[in-house]
């Protein structure tokens, strides 16, 4: 399985971005998918996950601003990020359980 993340970029504080992570190499993707992020000089931080049925868990620091959805037909998970803050800056990595990772997409929020 390979994961391809996309959608990162430069955005002003208060703006929005939508990240996407597409899985290839398998006909069906049923395991949980999710996102981590890593700010410069910081530990990697779990952002949230979503199961096959669409149930999500989102970390408290972004709850209410970030939302995760999943298109099972496209084998893609999305991270909608609204009201972005400078502290959201970092590289965002998608994952698929048990241990598949995307290459990371950089999000930079300017204040």
Image: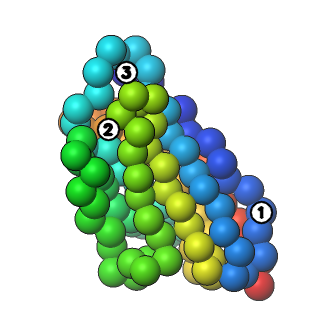
Q: Is residue 40 visible?
A: no
Between 56 and 110, the one lying in front of the other is 56
Q: Are marks 1 and 3 in contact (CB under 8 Å)?
A: no
Residue 75: mark in rendering: none
- Residue 1 appears in which quarter of the rendering? top left
In the rendering, which numbered label is found on residue 1? 3
69 or 106, which lies in front? 69
As drawn, 67 above or below 29: below
Q: Position of residue 63 (x, y in %)?
A: 39, 78
- The location of residue 85, given as percent across then percent down, is 63, 81
Q: What residue does disc 1 label?
A: 10
Q: Position of residue 83 (x, y in %)?
A: 61, 80
Rendering coords of residue 28 (x, y %)? 29, 21
Considering only order in the chain, which callout, 2 or 1, is on the residue closer to the N terminus?
Answer: 1
Q: Is residue 33 left or right of residue 92?
A: left
Tell which circle, 1 or 3, labels the residue nearer the N-terminal end. Answer: 3
């Amino acid at each position: 399985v390979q994961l391809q993340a996309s959608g990162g970029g430069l955005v002003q504080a208060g703006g929005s971005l939508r990240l996407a992570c597409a899985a290839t190499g398998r006909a069906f993707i049923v395991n949980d998918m999710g996102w981590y992020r890593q700010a410069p000089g910081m530990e990697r931080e779990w952002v949230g996950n979503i199961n096959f049925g669409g149930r999500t868990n989102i970390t408290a620091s972004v709850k209410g601003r970030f939302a995760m959805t999943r298109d099972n037909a496209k084998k893609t998970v999305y991270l909608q990020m609204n009201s972005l803050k400078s502290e959201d800056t970092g590289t965002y990595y998608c994952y698929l359980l048990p241990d598949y990772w995307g290459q990371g997409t950089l999000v930079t929020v300017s204040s």
